[in-house]
Image (cartoon, rainbow, N blue to C red):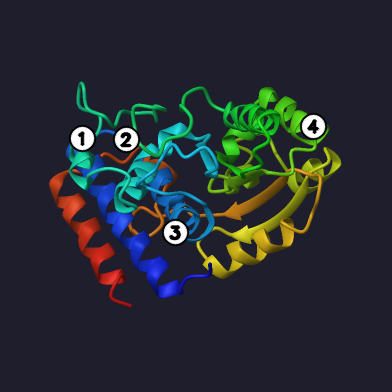
Amino acid sequence: MVLDASFLKEKASEIRRDVVRMIGLARSGHLLLSLAIVDILAWLYWEVLSIDPEDPWRESRDRFILGKGHGCPALYATLANRKFFERDELWSYRRLGAMLQGYPQALRTPGVDSPGGSSSMGLGLANGLALALRHRGIFSRIFCLAGDSELQEGVFWESAISSAHFSLENVFLLVDRSSFREEETGERPRLEPLREKLLSFGWAVDECDGHEFDSLRKSLDKLELCASRPKCLLARTRLGKGISFLEDDKNAGRAVLDRERMDKALRELEKGSEF
């Protein structure tokens, strides 16, 4: 079901504001990269995934795996806004004993299908889920959101080989390319030509703008026509998206916000939601 872009933009704005509040209150968490993936999550959870917040463990549901587990504030805020649990849970993020911790925990948190943790393990978990469901005669889609830094790890490419070897056509990998500009400065090993590498591994691949819903839709529609192959959307995103004084600021690091900067960020996001 295609939703109006203004509806998804407002949902994304609400999620971003909650992410800022969560990390501001906790004074801990990865703000910039969480903000980068919000539009992708809003699109997935309101338009793409076959899920039911009132029946979060339904066997036939689509699954979502957050490979970049440190982006969990964005996932938590999305799940709360999608009514998987009470929004008040967000304000105890990272507190001792709270439901929402620094990495996603399956079974403990409604709507979380897989634990987060070691970098680059998400695609392997997606493969395992897809194979287990196939064995049970269930062909739900598995969506995995990975950061481009995870693609620096050898285990990712071993998983990518397995995805193609087993013809896991219901595995959809979304790569958040928020850090790809670092390759241009030589600060990290080059991943390019990434598209060609994945194609050579047997994947169907398309590139899109991770902040434009029409671009995301067109890529997904194109990839769903590719039978018998795993599918990858290479989504260009911006760190700190939505907050001008943080966007693409590599020096901001984890950007723990004091009260003044948190209020400034919230005012900017509130103003942006009016357009």
Q: Residue furthest front?
A: 137
Mark 4: secondary structure? loop
- Labels 2 & 1 near each other (Cβ < 8 A): yes
Whether 216 is drawn above or below 127: the answer is: below
Looking at the image, which residue is at 28% across and 75% down?
274
Image coordinates for residue 94, horizontal then vertical, percent:
25, 29
Depth check, front residue: 146 or 262: 146
Left or right side of 184 for 41? left
Q: Amino acid at mark 3?
A: Trp
Mark 2 vs mark 4: in front: 4
**Disc 1 from disc 4: Cα separation:** 42 Å
Q: Amino acid at mark 4?
A: Phe
Depth check, front residue: 237 or 157: 157
Query: Which numbered disc flags the more N-terminal residue, 4 or 3?
Result: 3
**Disc 1 from disc 3: Cα separation:** 27 Å
Residue under pointer 2 = 29
Q: Which mark is residue 46?
A: 3
Residue under pointer 1 = 26
Left or right side of 17 for 155? right
Left or right side of 118 for 90? left
Q: Which mark is residue 166?
A: 4
Q: Residues within 10 Å of mark 1 (few under 14, many from 20)?
A: some
Q: Amino acid at mark 2?
A: Gly
